[in-house]
Structure formats: structure tokens, C-alpha cells
Image: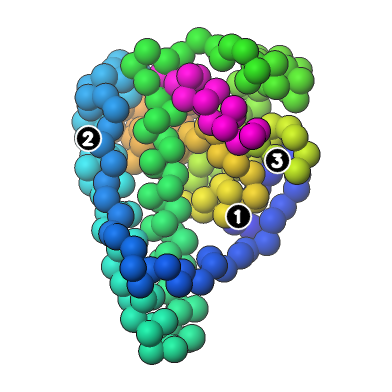
Amino acid sequence: MLCRLASGGRSGAKLIAPLGCLVSRQKHTLPDLPYDYGALEPHINAEIMQLHHSKHHATYVNNLNVAEEKYKEALAKGDVTAQVSLQPALKFNGGGHINHTIFWTNLSPNGGGEPKGELMEAIKRDFGSFANFKEKLTAVSVGVQGSGWGWLGYNKEQGRLQIAACANQDPLQGTTGLIPLLGIDVWEHAYYLQYKNVRPDYLKAIWNVINWENISSRYATCKK
């Protein structure tokens, strides 16, 4: 199973839609961080942030560009077999790029605390309280087997918030339909240099740098 909703729902694997627009599109680039590598200390140290952004995320971007170029060539040749064989690379590297681009903006040196306004009201409505929500998302994130992500997403059809766990770099919206609001990276490269194999300590620390202003903005946008 590629992605698991905390409510117990499941979604089957989907092939990425044909990327016909690749013929004319520009290459993906690594986004700049909105803060310095050391800005999230002591909760996430500078060495982790530098390696995570400039090495890991950069690798996803580079490999995505390579996969898209190969896909463009396969489209031009009408080589369906090659197009299908490239789907895993597109999903993994495309998901890695999507997920990390969200992740950096979900964090802030001025973060932490609790959300306000409509987002807080929605959290209380759908999870009972902020404390319950925080406990559930932490538990789902800690419980990811191997590498993956814990997510808070918006179910547009049902008009409510949901928690989900995704394996590897599976993108939340592409595999569950949920619109991503908050993603917590639980790949070991996100925390091992500081927290070793104690993922719960990393999860406890990351709440101190969660950017609720960004997440509230995402929530307001997806409701339109």
C-alpha cells in the first residue's frame, strides 16, 4: 500500500498522468529556503538542514529532470513501454520534489505554538482538540515503517481535515486525493545526525518550528 489514511481508508496505486506538456516546459530547480540552514536550531541543526536541502532535495530535482527528459523522448517515439517503465522514477523523484518544497515552507524559526482562526476551528471540529490532533499526527508519523511522511491533508469532497501516512516519497494528493497542508518528513536523513534512531524525539522537537501561518494559508486556499 502506497499511502495510508489514518481513518483506515486506502487508495490503490495510480500511474502518473501522461506528461504531454513536458515538450515545452522548463526544468525543475531547487527552491531557496526562506531561512538560513541554522535558523531552526536547536530543534533541527544546521548540518541536517544543509544536507537535507542541498543534497537530498537537489538529488530529487536532478533525477526528476532526467526522468522527464527520457519521458519526453519516449513520447516522441511513441514508446509506451518506456513511458510505463519511467513511471516509478517520475513518482519517486517528483514526489520527493513536491514533498520537500512543501516541507520547507511548513517550518519556520518563528513557528511552534498553536494555529489560530479557521484552521484551529477545523482541527477542533475534526479531531476534538489541538492536543488530540497533535497526538494523532505524531503517532502516525512515528509509526511509518521505514521511510515516509506523516501528513495533515484536506479532503475537499468531505470538507474536513484528515491525517495520513505515505511511504517513501509518495505524494499525498497524487495517491490519496487529499490536499497537503502539513507534511512531516520521517526519512532518517531528516533527523538521524541529531536524533540518531530515536524518531519520537525528533517528532517532539519539530512541533517547535511548525509554521502555522503557512499551513493556515494553505487551508484557506484549498477551501476556495
155 and 166: which is toward the camera: 155
Question: How many badges with numbers are in the image?
Answer: 3
Amino acid, disc 1: Thr
Disc 2 versus disc 1: nearer the observer: 1
Q: Identify residue type, mark 3.
A: Lys
Mark 2, residue position = 50
Which class describes the residues within 10 Å of circle 1: few (<14), some (14-19), or many (20+)? some
Residue behind mark 1:
175
Identify the residue at horizontal 28%, vertical 32% (top origin).
33
Earlier in the chain: of badge 2 and badge 1, it is 2
Q: Provide residue 11's location: percent of width, then percent of height.
A: 69, 56
Residue located 36% across and 36% down the image: 190
Q: Secondary structure at mark 2?
A: helix
The range drawn in magenta is 206-224
Q: In whole angstroms, how far apart are the C-alphas of marks 3 and 1?
A: 14 Å
Query: Secondary structure under badge 1?
Result: helix
Q: Position of residue 34 (x, y in %)?
A: 29, 27
Which labelled disc corresponds to residue 156? 3
Mark 2 crowdedness (10 Å alpha carbons): few <14, some 14-19, many ≥20: some
Circles 2, 1 touching at the beta carbon (< 8 Å): no
Question: Residue 68 lies in what quarter of the image?
Answer: bottom left
Which residue is found at the position 34% from the left and 41% from the top? 189
